[in-house]
Amino acid sequence: MTALPSPTALPALTLVTGGARSGKSRLAEALARATGLPRRYVATAQALDPEMAARIAHHRAERGAGWQTVEAPLDLGPALADGGGRVTLVDCATLWLTNHLLAGHDLDAETDRLAGKLRAAPGPVIVVTNEVGWGIVPDNALSRQFRDAQGRLNQRLAAEAGLVVAVLSGLPLVLKGRMP
Amino acid sequence: MTALPSPTALPALTLVTGGARSGKSRLAEALARATGLPRRYVATAQALDPEMAARIAHHRAERGAGWQTVEAPLDLGPALADGGGRVTLVDCATLWLTNHLLAGHDLDAETDRLAGKLRAAPGPVIVVTNEVGWGIVPDNALSRQFRDAQGRLNQRLAAEAGLVVAVLSGLPLVLKGRMP
Amino acid sequence: MTALPSPTALPALTLVTGGARSGKSRLAEALARATGLPRRYVATAQALDPEMAARIAHHRAERGAGWQTVEAPLDLGPALADGGGRVTLVDCATLWLTNHLLAGHDLDAETDRLAGKLRAAPGPVIVVTNEVGWGIVPDNALSRQFRDAQGRLNQRLAAEAGLVVAVLSGLPLVLKGRMP
């Protein structure tokens, strides 16, 4: 995946989906790097506890240098709007949706708003997201509500994306479009 | 998916699998519609609480008009048997299996019986099911038992089906046969 | 899957991944059988309670005769080292990782060690593993830690394997290499 030819063109929107710790971020970073464009990393994670802080540090170390990092836990608008001439990587839509859940927002309304902002973004955008609905039905209503909202978000972004790739055990599985 | 050519032939049995809220029902409905045949919808859900009632209403609204709906939470036999000249959509095998679990029935014996009834059905049948085994091992024995029974049911139906499609983020991934 | 031509060559390492009760073991056994080589089965399960004992007995019955079985819950070294002229099936990496978690070991260090032993194994090895990260984030830290370690293990083995196959509803989905 790191051997992608450069520079390669990406569609306006690319979606990288899959399970936790499957190599989604690594694939998304390789896709961004292969464009040869200046790279912006939009981090939706919040270091609210030591475990999350460790995850963020780990992701940052794996990503390496050469990224302009913008933290945007809730509103991706500014980070997406002034991205002309750049490739923007949003990592990830699942933490972004979790942040809105914790803030008590309407998740489907936020998804609508996000889709509009992605459509208006000037450069190619890559969004990392998670498949969260392949287990036993969660036994609490909030988890079920989140799972449904995440599923609808993924369907929405996949419908608009020109390239959709699932990642399993670090390996890409193209669902829509073509890998560059 | 809504742009499938019509009329298209379906095999005797089609299985549509995937995670929760991944677009399985929508794909199954599009496949049914594309046959050009009169459509029967076999609903296995029971509106036992407000959340389930809301899910059922939501599915019905998304499905639109043009369906004859039969409620069959446990015994699919009558709904399948007199389906000549029709396409029948069973949505879904996971709720059907859950209903049998709650009724204290032998899940593998019920699966055997279902397979026999599907084999005897006169028209094409589409069954929607869920992948439920891609998470951490559930910490209660009943969930593990259900997960195993669901896995065996999916293997059984997939072995008999002429077309098997997984759905991820709303996008189809053909596992067996060919999309019409 | 049982109709694979025999004898067929396998790469040094094959990884079979997927959800619980998806037919992973059955596919791995068919791949082993098709080599025509003497077969060794490396069982990582421990019959610590009646449920696990039942699962082990079930797997053994499904596997049939013709296997030399070696129990190796923690150290796969000896079972892998003297496998010359044989095909070795390790079932499964998820129980192996669970055993190390329960023993309080460093999971990433054990994964490194396992990768080295697999690389040194004299005959073809097939490893069965599980995708465990496609559900809602588990609410306890140990499950999250396990999920991450399993994801890293899967990525590591998939990167080294010549053939990687996911199994859904009993059907193979090739992610890397070619099915024999």
Image (tube, coloured by chain):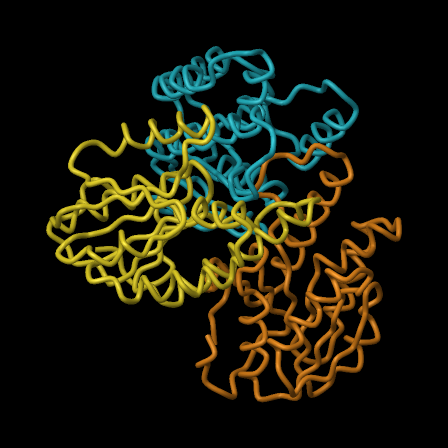
Chain colours: A orange, B cyan, C yellow
Q: Residue at x 60, y 76 (%)?
A: A62
Q: Residue at x 40, y 27 (%)?
A: C53
When asked about the image quadrant of residue C163, the answer is: bottom left
Q: Extreme right residue here?
A: A104
Count of marks, rendered view? 0
Quarter that holds the C terminus of chain C: bottom left
Tell me if residue A165 can be seen: yes
| Residue A133 percent across, percent down from the top left | 61, 44
Q: Nearer the viewer, residue C103 or A152?
A: C103
| Residue B78 percent across, percent down from the top left | 48, 10
| Residue B123 percent across, percent down from the top left | 40, 24
Quarter that holds the N terminus of chain C: top left
Q: Nearer the viewer, residue C16 or C55?
A: C55
Side of C82 relative to A4 (left or right) = left
Q: Is residue A164 above or below residue B9?
A: below
Q: Is residue C155 above or below residue B57?
A: below
Side of C137 relative to B128 (left or right) = right
| Residue C17 percent across, percent down from the top left | 41, 50
Side of A89 relative to C5 (left or right) = right
Tell me if residue B87 can be seen: no
Q: Residue at x 76, y 35 (%)?
A: A141
Side of C92 relative to A20 (left or right) = left
